Amino acid sequence: MLKYITSRLLMLIPVLIGVSILAFSLIHLVPGDPARSILGEKATAAQLEALRNELGLNDPYVVQYGRFLGHILQGDLGKSIQSKESIGVELIQKLPATIELAIFAMVIAIVIGVLAGVIAAVKQYSWFDNISMTVSLFGVSLPIFWLGLMMIWIFSVTFNILPPSGRLTTGVELNTITNFYLLDSILTGNWVALKDAFLHLLMPGIALATIPMAIIARMTRSSMLEVMRQDYIRTANAKGLRKTIIIFQHALKNASLPVLTVVGLQFGLLLGGAVLTESIFSWPGVGRYVYLAVLGRDYPVVQSTILVIAAIFVFVNLITDILYKYLDPRIKYE
Amino acid sequence: MKKRYLFMLLIIVAMILSACGDSTSKSNNKDNGGGEKTLVFGRGADSIQLDPSKVTDGESIYVTNQIYDTLVRYVEENTEVKPALATEWNVTDDGLVWTFQLRDDVKFHDGTDFTAEDVVYNFERWTTSAEFTYYGYMFGASEDDMGGIIEKVEATGDYEVQITLSEPNAPFLQTLAMPPFGIASPDAIEEHGDNYFKNPVGTGPFVFKEWVPDDSITLTKNEDYFGEVAKIDKVIFRVIPDNGARFMELQAGTIDIMEGLNPQDIATAEGDDALQIIRRPSMNVSYMAMNMDKGGPMSDKLVRQAINMAINKDELIALYEGVGKEAKNPIPPSLWGFNDDIEPYAYDVEKAKALLAEAGYADGFDITLHTFSNPRPYMPQPKLAAQAIAEMLKEVNINVEITESDWDTHLATVENGEHDMAFLGWTGDNGDPDNFLYVLLDKDNATVGSAGNIAFYKSDEVHDILKAAQVEMDQDKRTELYLKVQEIIHEDAPWVPIAHTTPPLAAKSSVVDFVPHPTGSEPFNLLDIKK
């Protein structure tokens, strides 16, 4: 096992080099000039040229890429050319926001999605099955920005029971340690902030959970249907085992392998792709950070952040693979 | 199995927490007790840096305009200037040496005294790098001559500063009133070095307190402000990226005022007693430039006039959805020197056809129109505007081919003069007509590769008048000159002027005495919140 993990971690290196080349080429292929986006439309040609030189944008691509890679190898993610802030520092603020939201959304998606999928499978063709599968079809096709705005309109404007945006109400104090606000408020025993942070998580969390929840529900249902037809389930039934034990202990465990794959992939997607949710709910996370960097042609931010997200994505997939073994002991990693 | 129960337990706890949260979360804005007045300003993007000398984005300038003072400030309604850090000033007859008397009762927010040496320090700092964008741009600095037209800045007393220019510059005072020339505390700059932009220290009506990137910036009032001390205690600039979501926050009451309204929300706000719409006077213009540098039809005045007549401006203004006003001159009406006697070219297809025939283009011609993909403050729907113009010109047999590119590419294309016709716009910097007319229509700025004058309009007559106006210190005489220039430009028709926008803000009705400034930002010390 240890050997497997080591080899997988070693494989990270070529993957990340590939990602870094891809990220570097893509952002440089996009037309646009960072110097222009920093200095604005009013800068003179001389000012632009001076800044391009200062930023090293006039060097050959190979030199620029080499410099980028060199810094990365020294553990230096570089500096944002827009804000002049170290990218490491900015990511330490923004990654926890995104991860916190993604975990929260995944918990909602898994709990509700798996439950709905199991019930739908056990009661196949029942009204619950029909309704939940129709709803989940809506779930995958629902535009998040629309859903988000509707939620704000209903819960914040009309009923005024949930805060519309942000991570904390302005004025609520919280000493941040990890920048995971739920965790920080528990660590510091700040129950006011805990409640406030939790309430702020609800709407973006649910909005972000809709798509994975729908996918998980449908995946669980089909996977469960397949397992429930297996001989050993019939045997268990014949032995007179309690229905819940059959379903949750015997069937669900075997049915969860494909579900786990989906969960791993969806979680990775949420880490990098929550731009819309983060925009609607003013969530200061990584998705918007990269999006703004692309607009502002902030090359270092785009390159380094994509690299970090890719690393996390690979890491999440590694964990998923390890969990496979726990779910299905027949799987052997050599 | 146990883990699964733990999950369930967590969810149940979460539900209970959220249920008991309902009753209390209503009072989640404002008043943290004690009747403190807080203004929460909602906007679409965060500031980039809080060092105004290094930025050009409105989001940074808006905040720094609260923290810093300039030697002179704009008056509340327009771009004339009034005393600020400088109480009075005079200029020698040749327009070269400006002497400013400074206030002797001002302290920076870090407690240090404000003196003439601090002004000198700031001016010298602005000449140390190309990063100080606005200094370089407004005063013509280059790599070889970092000072530009400012030759030297000296402290001629504890509270007296003398600025010597290499050539007379009539808009000089108005330029000094621009927020990028806010005077910063030298001690703070030295102390924070590269991190100064996150720790701004000025003398303004509000003191910087906290910046949570991409979330909020908090300022508190400066009790010792030398001008009018703010009536509100705290200002919070909050980032809410989505226009629709931001408006809902205003309706929900979590913010007090916002910019960047969706057009359809204007009517909603106007119909709501709890809200008000505030329109910012325009300091911009959008136009379609006709490139006179390429030969062909565009270099014929009759053709340019005909195109002006063939375009139905009402249709273009409709695309502004209530925030645009038809333009007839290159400068907006909020500026002094605006020539209101100009009669805009009336929409008249037949007359346009006749003019084209006279110019020898009765059968029309093919032409390109360059536009950009993202909306700009002065042009919300560039693509639709281009399509509308193409349709209109088809009526007079001109066949328009539209080329759409992203903003950076578009700028490069038009500065290189690769277009026949192109959309562009301009937002004024210091509120002086020179900042529109010279920049956009003088032959000095018609250099291929870096053109501001993208019509490549090279009138010697216009050039002579504009140059004379730059060194004329008498305001009335300058006004005369600018009125005249607008007549010539109208006749030569290098552009189709399109619109000036009046960007709307929406606020709670309880926000009073908010006077929007044409430059795009105003200090908040004069406004108040009614209880």
Image (cartoon, coloured by chain):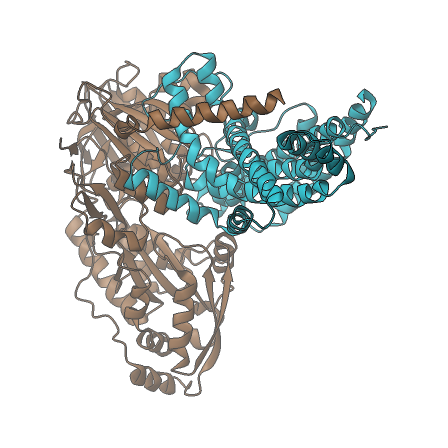
Find residue A144 and report its horizontal and vertical position in percent: 47, 46
Find residue A159 and report its horizontal and vertical position in percent: 29, 38
On-image quarter of the C terminus of chain A: top right
- The answer to whether one can see residue B68 in this image is no
* Chain identifier, brown in the render: B
| Left or right of B302 in this view: A219 | right
In the rendered view, tell whether residue B184 sits above or below residue B367.
Answer: above
Q: Residue furthest right?
A: A334
Residue in front for this viewpoint, A193 or B330:
A193
- The answer to whether one can see residue B448 in this image is yes
Residue in front for this viewpoint, B346 or B143:
B346
Find residue B41 and report its horizontal and vertical position in percent: 29, 35
| Left or right of A300 in this view: B411 | left
Residue drawn at 71 percent across, 44 percent down: A226
In the rendered view, tell whether residue B149 sits above or below residue B294.
Answer: above
Residue in front for this viewpoint, B221 or B486:
B221
On-image quarter of the N terminus of chain A: top right
**Number of marks in the rendered image:** 0
Residue drawn at 30 percent across, 76 percent down: B309
Find residue B284 and report its horizontal and vertical position in percent: 30, 53
| Left or right of A59 in this view: B310 | left
Q: Quadrant of residue B57?
A: top left
Residue in front for this viewpoint, B15 or A322:
B15
Shade representing chain A: cyan
